């Protein structure tokens, strides 16, 4: 009897994954980022949100500037589950998956840091992303 109690209590003590997600939008950015945060907060625990910054588009330059930032969360989700959740949120907010890779978008959500490990190489090449991630690391 005692072992099943121990197993139950250790299961409920699952250590959450600490994740930093990069955020980007250049279609109704303020509205879409606000909606995304509301949806995300119903699924995970938001710990910290970086300042949002305006950035010039990369690749396709003839489009509105982007609003970028980062959000630090804690979640019991495994990485694959979280990626699926982020895609669902993007779809809910009207993300057009047929649009060009660097084209306009309602919302773009990417896992940048997973439990202290940088998992998105853009962290090293995009100053705005590095600054936003570093801001919420602490």
Image (cartoon, rainbow, N blue to C red):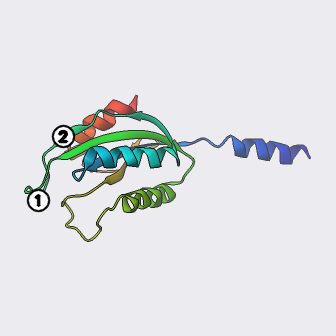
Q: Residue at x 31, y 62 (%)?
A: 95
Q: Is residue 112 visible?
A: no
Find residue 129 and report its image quarter.
Answer: top left
Labelled disc at residue 60: 1
12 or 115, which is in the foreground?
A: 12
Q: Relative to residue 137, is residue 45 drawn left or right?
A: right
Question: In x, y percent, where is residue 22?
Answer: 33, 46
Q: Residue at point 44% right, 45% down?
A: 38
Q: Is residue 52 visible?
A: yes
Q: Residue at x 44, y 58 (%)?
A: 83
User: Could you tell me residue 24's position as x and y percent?
Assistant: 27, 49
Q: Residues within 10 Å of mark 2 (few under 14, many from 20)?
A: some
Q: Looking at the rendering, which quadrant does residue 100 occupy? A: bottom left
- Position of 108 with respect to 62 (left or right) is right
In the displayed orientation, state which residue is furthest to the top. 138
Q: Residue furthest bottom?
A: 98
Foreground: 56 or 80?
Answer: 56
State the residue in front, 114 or 34.
34
């Amino acid at each position: 009897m005692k072992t099943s109690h121990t197993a139950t209590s250790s299961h409920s003590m699952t250590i959450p994954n600490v994740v930093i997600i990069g955020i980007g939008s250049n279609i109704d950015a303020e509205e879409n980022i606000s909606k995304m945060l509301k949806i995300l907060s119903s699924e995970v625990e938001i710990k910290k949100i970086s300042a949002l910054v305006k950035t010039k588009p990369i690749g396709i330059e003839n489009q509105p500037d982007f609003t970028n930032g980062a959000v630090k969360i804690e979640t019991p989700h495994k990485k694959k589950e979280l990626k699926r959740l982020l895609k669902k949120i993007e779809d809910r907010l009207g993300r057009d998956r047929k649009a060009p890779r660097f084209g306009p978008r309602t919302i773009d959500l990417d896992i940048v840091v997973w439990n202290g490990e940088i998992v998105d190489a853009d962290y090293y090449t995009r100053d705005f992303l590095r600054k936003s991630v570093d801001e919420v690391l602490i």
